[in-house]
Amino acid sequence: MFWTTLTFCVITAVTLLGQVRRSRTKRLRNTGGVTFAARECPRCHTVAPATASRCPGCGIPSQIFEYVTARESRTPTPAEGLRALHANVRADRCVGCGSCVAACPESGAIAMHDRLAMVDAEFCVGRGECATACPVGAVELFAGAAVNRVVVPQTDFNFETNVPGLFIVGELGGRGLIKNAINEGKVAIEHIAADLAPGSQGEESGPEALDVVIVGAGPAGLSAGLEALRSGLSYVILEQSSLADSVRKYPRHKVLFAEPVNIPVYGDLWVADASKEKLLEAWEKIVAETGLKVETECRVEEIARQGWLFRVRAGEREYRARRVVLAMGRRGTPRRLGVPGEELDKVFYDIVEMEDFAGRQVLVVGGGDTAIESALGLASQEGTNVTLSYRGEKFLRIKERLQVKLDRAVRDGRIELILESTVRMIRSDTVVLDTDGGVRIIPNDDVVVRIGGEAPVAFLEKMGVRLVQKEVPLSPDVANAS
């Protein structure tokens, strides 16, 4: 009888505590005459105002858990599906680059106001070019309810996937801002360090097994590496290209950190208001001074489980690790031309700000929508001379509206189109093309390669990572009026 009563009391107490915690998180609280919504930190369970940008207990910014806490997406109702699409801009993501404004075909539908893109609902017809052009996913299209439906890897609050021991941070997890990437890399390694503390696991290991392999040397990967170094973990960072390759391919002198100020930084990799060059210089200095282990030109081709460990294969090199952190880019590996000179700083695989190419001679290579959109956007910059090179004799799969715009730009002399051409060599001030009429050398300042890429979806699915579609709500405090 005693044990029965005790068991009943324990179960009752646990249930009541859970209800109190849940209600405390959801209910409106009143402190000092100010009413606010309470929210519980998913990691340390400290309760704070829902408007707080970071947890007062552990210091972690709440914004990095946005996709983790979002519910899985439902199928829109027929009524929602019939409503006209419209664009919206997330104020907590917009970096003020203006790419959406340049891409929008509807005059006045979207414009810059105080470094923030704003949508005018009267003119917006939901074409979607603005959302496609936005480099940080701040512009979204909606039909009905203001929610953004995104497909992301399933992770928990430590950014561990459904595959035990495999973590995903940064852009690959759907969150493109550099601040978020820095924060997530640190959070994931903090959890790994605690999880692998002596006596906590009893897993198989050995002198040849690393505690963690980090794939990707962008902001998320470098932040994870610094935390691994600080925590005394054995680790290596594997990067398929060069250090911070995605940042390195940004236009020269681009100021990278005009980012939302309401996102605090938890990691220590931040360099405020830095240009691309200053950022890379700072990160290279950090790597040199700390001795951070970064293996560049080391593309990971396979990750597989072997008992308690992961086997990570990168070309002829092979690593065994207790944990793996994927800090790769979301857009996959860009296809390369494979020609001499492609390693020059003048070669880009993506464009963040079209304005940085104003007054320059630019060659765009490719025949898909992204290549043509890039060429059109560049051609709209003052004084920019744009040449579009495509190996085919005509464009086969581009949208009709793009074909019309391209034809007009060629007719107006804003774009020179060279069909049936391939790049033979890239030089510091020229590009050598093979054309149906022979070799042609054109003056050149920059080359933009848009010939597709190898998306990481198959790579994730092969490892067993579950991809889910989630609905991320746009509350009034993060969406501008539209």
Image (spheres, rainbow, N blue to C red):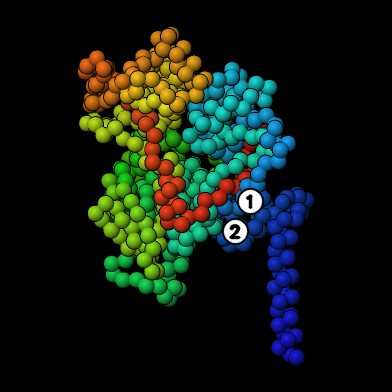
Tag nearer the camera, 1 or 2: 1
Residue shown at 61%/57% (left/top)?
Answer: 41
Residue at position x 45%, y 17% in the image: 406
Q: Residue at x 63, y 51 (%)?
A: 71
Where is residue 218, by image quadrant? top left
Q: Residue furthest top?
A: 412
Circle 1: residue type: Arg
* Residue under numbered circle 2: 42
Does residue 268 appear in this view? no
**Whole-Å distance between the Cαs marked 1 and 2?**
15 Å
Q: Secondary structure at mark 2?
A: loop
Q: Is residue 10 left or right of residue 213?
A: right
- Where is residue 132 drawn, in percent x and y? 51, 31
Which residue is nearer to you in this view: 188 or 163?
163
Q: Please name whichever residue, 41 or 453, is drawn nearer the observer in this view of the structure.
A: 453
Type of the residue with mark 2:
Pro
Q: Position of residue 104 (x, y in %)?
A: 55, 23
On residue 71, which mark appears? 1
Relative to 145, residue 389 above or below: above
Q: Quadrant of residue 355?
A: top left
**Counting residues from the N terminus, which is met first, the one under dot 1 or under dot 2?**
2
Is the N terminus in the top left, top right, bottom left or bottom right quadrant?
A: bottom right
Q: Would you place residue 415 above or below residue 63 in this image?
A: above
